[in-house]
Amino acid sequence: GESEEELRAAGRPMVNPDVIFDRYRGNRGVSVQSWLKFCRDALLLDNSWTYYDALHAFDDLAEHDGDDGDGEEEYSLDDPSGRILGYDAFLLALRRVARQSSAVFEYGQQALQTMDEELAKDEMEVRWTGFRQYVGEFLQANPRSDDDVLLMDFIYSEEVIGVMVECEYKFRRTYKRLLKQNGKIPKWEDLATTHRHMKMDQNGVQKFLRDLVPKELGGPIRQEDWSTALRASNHESTSKETSGKTSGEATLPELMEMIFRCAMGGTGVSWAMRDETDPETDKRPFDQEKDGPIEAADRIRVLLEFVWDWLEAERKSDDSELEDHTVLMEECPLYDTAHTDLQMIFMHYCTNEPYSEAMDYSNPMLTMPSTTLFRFCADSGFMDSRVTYTAIYERYTSLAAGKGPWEKRDINYSFFCRLLSGLARIKYEEARSVVAITMLLEQWLVPMVNLTIPSTELKDFLFTQDMLSFFLIYEVHIGKMFDKHATTREVVLNRHGLEETKGSMAHTALDEPHKKIKRVIDLGEEEKEHASLNSRKQTKNMTLIDLNSFFKALRFVPDMLTVEEVPEIFDAVVNSTPHLQMAINDASMCLSQLLQALTSCALIMYSRPPYSSKYATREEKVLAMMERVEVTYYTMFSRFMPLEAKANFPAVDWKLTGMTKESQLREFLIARRLQRGMSLVAVTPKTHLLGDTEGTVSNGMAAQRQYTPIPERQDGKRTVSLGMPSIVREQLFAPEAPYPVGPLMETALIHHNAARYKAAVETYLQALNTWHSMVLEAAEQAKLGGTVGTLDNTVKSTKETDEDGEPPLSPQRGEGGGLEMQEEIDNVQLLFFFISLGGVYESAGLDELALACYTEGRLIGDTVKGAEMALAYSAIGNVVFHLGQHTVALSFFQAALKIRETAMGERHMDTGLLYNNIGACYDLLNRVTEATESYGKACDVFQFEFGLTHPRTATAMRNLARVKQRRFDFHVSFAPRHPTPCPAKLLGGEKKKKGKKGKKGGGKGKKKK
């Protein structure tokens, strides 16, 4: 008396697979007809498990009935005769249904609530339980389809099964178009996951069948034929023992069966010959007694021609730009024959399984990591100036909007096809979508089948999550440098893609390849207007000569690479795939390949002395290379790279707390720096950098002081006798901290001074974690209503605010003199730890890790108020100065100086430190006058603060004495003087006033000449 819902909730009824096998087996096993009949009777055939899926499973698992074990029998899906599913193969086939059917998945989710925890962790076991419940509920003992002669003798005959295999993918396009006409969502992946809500309604099916055959060709199909087909093809109705009312909706397998039944109905077949003038045309209905499966297959093929005509007419009428961009991969006619190849490629990249006939590429649970997607695009070779890493990323995020970070999400086959369709439209934007997808499949994807591209250590490194994030950040800006060195060529779009034009070509000659494309994909003459392509396009690629000049601009050659190594790097990148080999003199590389070449250079250059001991990991070598690229970018464009992190990364929830090992911190810093992208540059207003104001300083209206940097030697190198100027490092004061955090920080400083750098790093991390745990404990006590203790238990539980209402920048002392326990570690305290860790790495000679710590500190320092903001800028300047990038170091020191002059004034010792460091940058840039002025200011401040005997004073005075030995780099010039005009009074230009009549001296007289 329990309802079906209660039975499902209790885990009943569950069918026994042995019972199914005994019921549908023949003499030795389950034939293909019995296998299809079982799928139909159990209501397993829907939009997620179609006839093609069922036949493909049978083809993979069935064995020959007369197999004698010699393995010489050859059989395929097109000839399933004599093949059976044994018991083990039948169980595997059932599990494949359970894995792929969306209806089974829904039942599995319901069964999940009653399953054991251990079994519930196995997704396949959950689906298998759902499958047994689903089949146990819907499979009837004596379904009415057992008496359907047309189904068993004709539709499930070997000849008609061959037609099913041939045409299902075209049927998918037809089914999608019908759903679109009825206002349904026109996406096949939606049909496969929401099959119960995406069926064709009965009215739409009736209209389609009624109007399928034109009247002039013998139509329409008789009402008796299509109404009988509707009733007999409804799986839900015919699988029951008695007839009952159903919804009348149709899935894809049901629609296919309806069309097959209409072809074998009572309608005359004069239209079948497609030629009314043929006198031998037989105008008779299908006779089940006289006609056999071969005649049935012929009639079905003829009727399908009308279906394909309808599909082509619908596609041609759909010519708006908006509709053109909704075309999926299955809309392409070439996909009907290439879908198996594409599925094999997808599985190969998902599992690294070699290509073979035994590949089970129908598994819907196969997913490809996002990093592997980028690797596939690079291996296929279709990446160019349009299809870049950024274009792939933007297409990926647009399709997966709101579904989590890209680096943590895997994609299925349906998503994979949609992504490739979008990339085809980007690559061949001049063509219509169907043409673009055809060219992508024919030229780039299909040739990859059965092609195993060997994996190398470099490729494995290039396509990691961190490196891909790194490429995405830098690609746009390196693209500007790429454009300056690349060669511009005119290309024409033909069936092989964008190819370079040879000489001048007439406009009519340029049109010929476009006509050729339309012949390949079998487009009619009516499509000429819609499929017209632009004749010429310009594209930029980098040849071997261009790459060599680019490396010279970066000073890779000859400083760190030899000229002979450049062709080797070029060849390794351009010819990385076996099926796209070219001679290096004829080859060229795109922007994405340039990024790979730069990475290869970094691993080669920084693996040699003296850099091999300085950079511990490959990521550090890549970052060191990009610092050179950023400096070259500044040289080319007079500004730094305006790098900004992408929207989906970096992960903002990363914390420094929780790390205890130095290796963990190293991985954290490198990953953050690669993903953030702001490895070197300071995002400051242009007025604080060099650039337009460099070279001339005005001093008055008439006289001007003009600067011209003058090196001491003609070759531009610094004279050895001058030595190198010395910079002063920041003096860092630890914040007040509770016990035992304070002693731990002192211990870390002792380790640092004793050159025990790993111990120093781990002690700083221990201090931070201890402080963090104490803060959390204090906050928990405050929530429970207690008080947060201090060193003498006299402080309140909440953090006090200062006079401006802002949180205190460091721990405060309470009324009793004890140190207050905070609710959280503030940014100033976290800034201290980052700067301290950076100082340890800088002392150890690990400049990249030091720079990573300082850049993290800079992000934190920009959020605080006061002089602490300048700490990170000054620290970054120190590291960059030692890396030899004095222009960049100067910009950081100037940014820190502006902050300190505002917060502390010009006479503070920390401000004087920056005067000295700025002078050192000017000195090495041969700007002698400005260096002298900066050193002089530093000496004045240090003498005022420390006196003449302090080491800082001595350092500044030594730098000043050294720079005074150099020639000044300016001369005084005067503006040209213009003659001053003489006043009009001196020239007699003013007339003397006349006196009035009647007064003395006012009589008449002679006028003076």
Image: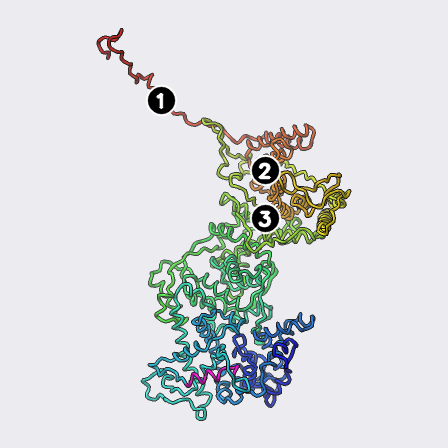
| Mark 2 → mark 3, Cα distance in angstroms | 21 Å
| Mark 2 → mark 1, Cα distance in angstroms | 49 Å
373, above or below 754, in the image? below
* Amino acid type indicated by mark 3: Ser
Specify whether residue 93 is in view: no
Question: Foreground mark, 2 or 3?
Answer: 2
Q: Residue 485 vs residue 779: left or right?
A: left
Residue nearest the observer in this picture, 848 or 250: 250
| Mark 3 → mark 1, Cα distance in angstroms | 60 Å
Residue 899: assigned label: 2
Residue nearest the observer in this picture, 197 or 99: 197
Residue 231 is covered by the magenta coloring: yes
Residue in the image at 54% along x and 58% along y: 573
Q: Which residues are magenta?
A: 224-237
Q: Callout 3: helix, strand or loop?
A: loop
**Residue carrying label 3:** 679
238, above or below 735, in the image? below
Q: What coloring was used for the rendering?
A: rainbow
> How many numbered discs?
3
Number of other residues with Cα within 10 Å of mark 3, as a class: few under 14, some 14 to 19, many 20 or more: many
Q: Position of residue 813 (x, y in %)?
A: 72, 40
Q: Quadrant of residue 496?
A: bottom left
Residue in the image at 57% along x and 88% along y: 142
Q: Callout 1: helix, strand or loop?
A: loop
Which of the two discs, 2 and 1, labels the residue nearer the N terminus? 2
Q: Position of residue 10 (x, y in %)?
A: 66, 77
Residue 981: assigned label: 1
